[in-house]
Amino acid sequence: MLAQQMVNGVLLGATYALFALGFTLIFGVLRVINLTYGFYFSAGAFIALYLTRVLGLNIVLALPLGTIAAGLIAVLMDSLLLPRLRHRRTAELDSLMVTLGAVLALYSIMTAWLGPDIRRFPPGTISADAIEILGVRLTAAQGLILLASFVLVAALMALMKFTRLGLAIRALAEKPDAAGLMGINVPATSRIVSFLSGALAGAGGILIGLNFNAIQPYMGESMMLRGFVVIIVGGMGDSRGALVAGLALGIIEVLTAGYIDSGLKEAVAFAILVVVLWTRPQGLFGRAVGQRA
Amino acid sequence: MTIPGWLDDFLWTYQTLIHDLGINGLLALAMYVVLAVGQLSLGQAAFMGLGAYSGALLSMKLHWPFALVLPASCVAPVLFALAIGVPTLRLSGVYLAIATIGLGEVLRSVYINWDYVGGALGLNGIPERAETWMIFSLLGVALLALFLVGRSRFGRAMEAMREDATAAAAMGINVQRYHLMALVTSAILAGLAGSLGAHEADFISPGEYGFEPAVTILSFALLGGIGNPAAPVAGAWFLTLLPEMMRDLPEIRLALNGVIIVLAVLFLPRGLFGWRMKRRAA
């Protein structure tokens, strides 16, 4: 029982970590709080749904295509909304507001267009078989989630660490002006960061959609609140922190739902957030930054 | 004095809207007082919820008269503000915004899971005791008080710390005390608004005090601007009236609200009504 709960928790946590990774990436590099990020999550899920339902594609194809499409939507939205704010003194607050307005509009347009109902992937999208290892059941969908999250996270980490693009992105995060002076194409690199983060959100949406087999326009919004918890607990802009905190949150939620009360899992998540903010506002793994005038 | 028939009809038809204008005005002021000292504290929806729930319970379970219920509705929000104020004063900017949203979500989960306050369904049958004159006289008093404060030395101190908290502290301003005072004032205003709203609508539910209202209240203040206390109220009225004019297009309403927020922040960084208060030289 506990082993099964732990596995379910790790699975949920893997998608949280994936989602939070993109969120923390865009905050860490572009210094904006992007509330439209939750929309890319919903968009990815709906595109995959369309691809499997209407075009009859296999989920193995629909997953990468939906991921890429979500990334492209992110590039479009971010280049409409964010460049204008980058040099303002209150860029963080302004980006919060702009993306808030945008996400309000995007969700309501999406709901008006597609309806608020919960939709499901067509039966047989993914095999219903399950394997049992040491008494723990793992379905094919869960296997796909585990595999896809692992591959995406590893690919992103490798990209950031070993490629010139990763170096450019890290330089941009460190000091955008200096990065520009060193010959890095700042607007193009920012667009790539938008793409990467949108793609991570889209992949997260498809995987969560597969896991619970329920897709609806506002699914990204409850995810955003978890994204906040994860990136604060892990430290804002800290990708390793986001991975650890995402996994931990998934496990804690599943255990709370399993052993205490499923209604309390959100309250527990936010209680953790508040305690961390009071004791370690820089995040569990972050360093304190001094305040300067 | 008798009210002419057409005016009576008008007031009857648009009563809810008129009440909403007053209540949203109070909420915009609750946002204004924290923004005016440079704190991005988004707990106003949580304060409003505490005021609404405590007020509704006092009316329904203890049958207190409304004249007592209304001031008593401020107690829970103020206690909550003091409890969160001391630790969150250490936070700033984005961290404070997210912490206060998180606290609001914790409260919302508590309402949903607590049967005494009606759980997810909320409370029904709250006596409708909030009168138009009460709402608008409270709004008027709050506006006047904030104008007077804004013109005093306190107002100068607030503006100084909003522009640069470190420099203000160096000039001898006790920044932390101002931040706590602003938070408590915000709790009082939002608690009053919540209680008035509950006694106006006769029905409250946890969803009315979550993330979305929190950011809607922020958008009132940002659209109006925070240069003077009347600006956020004007912003609130604008965003309350606008959807009303598009009653026939309910799906587009929220979308248009969103687009307006986007355009306002991108092109009007000081808000629609962004002029600053005039002061005599000190």
Image: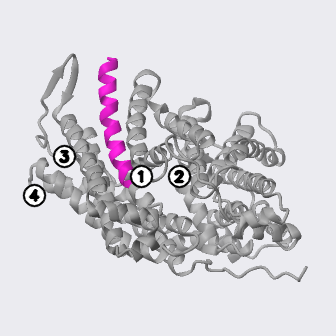
- Range of the magenta residues? A1-24
Q: Amino acid at mark 3?
A: Phe
Q: Which residue is mark 1?
A: A221
Residue at 82%, 57% (x, y): give it.
Answer: B174
How much space separates mark 2 and mark 1, taking CA atoms? Answer: 10 Å
Q: Amino acid at mark 4?
A: Leu
- Secondary structure type for disc 3: loop
Asked which quadrant contains residue A111, the reply is bottom left
Depth check: B24 or A266 in front? A266
Asked which quadrant contains residue A74, the reply is bottom left
- Secondary structure type for disc 4: loop
Q: Which residue is mark 2?
A: B211
Q: Which residue is mark 3?
A: A121
Residue at 67%, 47% (x, y): give it.
Answer: B88
Q: Is residue B238 above or below residue A32?
A: below
Depth check: A137 or B281 in front? B281
Residue A211 x, y percent position in the rendering: 26, 39
Chain letter for mark 2, please: B
Image quadrant in which the N terminus of chain B is located: bottom right
How much space separates mark 4 and mark 1, taking CA atoms? Answer: 27 Å
Mark 2 residue crowding within 10 angstroms, few (<14) / some (14–19) / many (20+): many
